[in-house]
Image (spheres, grey):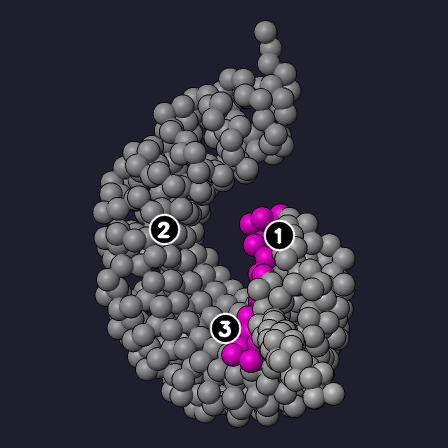
Amino acid sequence: MLFHSHLSSTHLFPVLLLVITTLLGGRQLTTATCHVDDQAGLLAFKSGITADPSGMLASWTPGSDCCKWSGISCGDNNRVTTLSLYGQLQKPNSFLSGTISPSLSKLPYLDGIYLQDLRNISGPFPNLLFGLPNLEYVYIENSKLSGQIPGNIGDLTRLGALSLAGNRFSGPIPSSISKLTQLGQLKLGSNLLAGPIPLGIQQLKNLTLLSLDTNQLTGTIPDFFSSFIKLRTLALSRNKLSGKIPASISTLAPILIYLELGHNDLTGKIPDFLGKFHALDTLDLSWNRLTGTVPKSFGNLTKIFNLDLSHNFLVDPFPEMKVKGIESLDLSYNGFHLGEIPKWVTSSTIIYSLNLAKCGIKMKLDDWKPVETYFYDYIDLSDNQVSGSPVQLLNRTDYLVGFWVSGNQVRFNMQNLKFPKTLKELDLSRNLVFGKVPKAISGLQKLNVSHNHLCGSIPATKFPASAFVGNDCLCGAPLPPCKI
């Protein structure tokens, strides 16, 4: 007996060691991979996806470590903390179709969900978000989620950022959104939201970005902006908002960089206080019903790069700006009589977009010599009293995409025009252009040379007859055939 027990203890030691090592090794193996619940939740999410043509979820295979799957990050405890899937809008097959599986609620450590530009994710607001106790960042952007934003959205009090931009949410913005006091960003733009802007948004004092643009919001812009001491971006464009620009916006002057109120139904004058926004980079007040003059104080907007006041009822005089360089300027379709293109525009070395249609400009294009034409993408001088030839100007541009000069007295031989490879739109209609239509027009997307003095056979083209009518002697498709 003694002999047997002696044998057991000596031989059992290596066996025990092996068992312990295996057990420990096994535990090491399990701690090195993600939690079984996390894996199950993610695989259920994958099963809700019906199309993944670019293989975004190809690495999501059962039995492999989900912490190493594409779009997944884990914390120190090997629990999944973020889900980040990004489509690429410029790549046609970079999308996901399907729905968001409620099984994501099995991932209790999830603090960030980033489902951006996936395009074809459908279904209602994902209620599983209410079951994630650590959730702080939600970006579900540019997909097809629809229905209403739930009334209890205010229960997600830990959120530091909420973006549902670019979906199909409809109905009102719930008033309970006022409880999300930790929010630094609130982006609900490009949906179908209706009704007024909730007054409770003034409780969100930590906002640096508020974007509600491109919806169907109505009523006035609430006069509650003195609550926001950190706001740098305010985007309310493309709604049905009415009334005046509220006075409390003046309190945002020290740090506001983007102010976008275009494409609404705003009335009254442009407030003088906007001239105090020394940090302002972009100001868009276009397509409203604003009246009166542009405040002289606009001369103080030395950092402004993008200014759009087009399609209002503004009148002379336009103030002298002291900008260091403007990138894009649109003053078209107001009551301005500028006479010439302002010197602060001509001297800008970074300008790419200039829209001065119907701005009372009287000049010879040959005399206009901008300091720099390299960056020009868009030039619109339609409906002015511009004469001369644009050939010298256009032949100096390398990246021009669109040139519009309809309704002027421009006179030149069209065959002398060099067409940059980038040129997509050209409108020379209602002028005094002569010569033949060059073959290079076949590379354009839009063309209008109607009502000029052009002659000869039209090169092979996809453009309708309306692009060529009213010339002296143009012929060939889409106009009647040439007489031999």
* Above or below 142: residue 106: below
> Which residue matches tag 2?
352
**Looking at the picture, how far across and down is residue 34, in whole percent?**
62, 73
Q: Would you name the residue on which mark 1 appears?
A: 94
Element type at mark 3: strand
The residue positioned 74% from the left and 75% from the top of the image is 103
Mark 2 or mark 1: name the one nearer the start of the chain. 1
Residue 421 visible (yes or no): yes
Quadrant of the snapshot with the N terminus = bottom right
Q: Which mark is residue 220?
A: none
Query: In the rendered structure, which disc, 3 or 2, sits on the residue that comes first in sequence?
Result: 3
Q: Could you tell me how far apart the alpha carbons at marks 1 and 3 are, in whole angstroms?
A: 28 Å
Residue 148: x and y in percent read: 73, 77
Bounds of the magenta segment: 70-92
- Which residue in the structure is indicated by mark 3? 235
Q: Is residue 265 visible?
A: no
